[in-house]
Image (spheres, grey):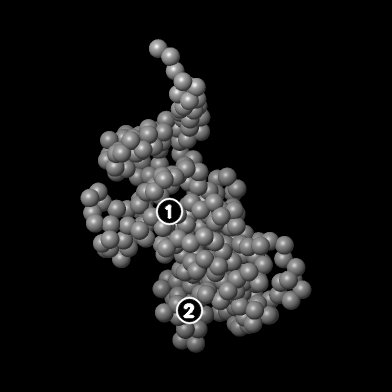
Amino acid sequence: MSFTLSEIRSAIKSILREEVGSAYFGKSFLEFKNRFEAGEYPFDILADMSEKVSYVGEGSTRIVYRFNDNPDYVLKIVNWAKGRDPTEKNYTGFDKQNMLDSNKWEASLKIQQKYADVFPRTTERADDYTWILSETVDTIPNYQKLFEIMEIDGEGFPANRTVFRMFWEELISNCIKVFQEADNQYRSEIFSKKIAESSSDPTVNFSDFESTVKDPTQKFDREKSKGFIFTKTGYTNKIKEIVSNRQNAKILAAMGSLKIPPREFSPKNLGISRITNKLVILDASLWEKYVTV
């Protein structure tokens, strides 16, 4: 039996792909990928591979799994049932295209390059973005740990949990606006024009960002909050403390540019990259139609 040069090349590529893929991502992921490309439904494959995968968690648009033979990567699959009308909206208000766009945004090479070290790094994806494979990120258990990572003082925040959440969202919203609004009151108090214009980092250069973040529907009322110890100067200093950290600034600037809601800057949606050991956003919460950035 004779083979054409094209057939030989194809066979070599297939062997190399299997050997390299198996060594880098693990045999279980390679099995999943090959079966998916052969036409099997992703959740059917994972159900059949139940002893080789572990459920990690889920959000409004994706369900996350980890392959047991390679804990350094996670598989994010659009949360859509087999056979369901893709134009319908599920209980979270999203249709299938919203979920696919969520994966497109996160897997975008331009997003990964423009906002380096802001999001987990994506390595593999389905052609139709049904799933993406990205680096595992170590989660953050609470705000106390988050403050430590952000290198900010945790003293002075409201003790009441509900009040704290409203206050934190307002604080992060104002931190984001520092990178968006040329006439922002906190920006003018914190940074000089010379510093703003001399930034060499494109993700932290103030002039790159437009004023797109809307105020939360439920704002923290500083006047009505009893026992709140931040003065006006203390509040401004807290914003300065947060945005002066380079990694905090990169994330907040990216959130403003991509219209990521301030509420997403919380322990449940942030983590530490095992590759860079830096703070990153786990889920960008971008489900609008993907556009080139």
Which of the pair 292/205 is nearer the observer? 292
Q: Residue at (45%, 80%) from the top-left corner?
A: 219
Label 1 amino acid?
Asn
> Looking at the rendering, which quadrant does residue 26 occupy?
top left
Q: Residue at (26%, 51%) from the top-left corner?
A: 81
Q: Secondary structure at mark 2?
A: loop
Neighbour tally class for label 2: few under 14, some 14-19, many 20 plus, Cα within 10 Å: few
Task: Identify the residue position indicated by label 2 in the image.
Answer: 215
Label 2 amino acid?
Asp
Q: Quadrant of the C terminus?
A: bottom right
> Does any portion of residue 70 appear in the rendered image?
yes
Q: Earlier in the sequence, mark 2 or mark 1?
A: 1
Indicate the position of residue 86 as horizontal and vertical percent values: 28, 57
Above or below for 18 versus 127: above
Numbered marks: total: 2
Q: From the viewer's perspective, is the residue at label 2 or at label 1 nearer? A: 1
Position of residue 93 in the picture relative to residue 221 (left or right): left
Indicate the position of residue 278 as horizontal and vertical percent values: 59, 52
Q: Residue at (42%, 30%) from the top-left corner?
A: 27
Whether label 2 touches label 1, CB < 8 Å: no
Q: Residue at (54%, 51%) from the top-left corner?
A: 109
Position of residue 197 in the picture relative to residue 109 (left or right): right
Task: Identify the residue position indicated by label 1 in the image.
Answer: 103
Q: Quadrant of the N terminus?
A: top left
Neighbour tally class for label 1: few under 14, some 14-19, many 20 plus, Cα within 10 Å: many
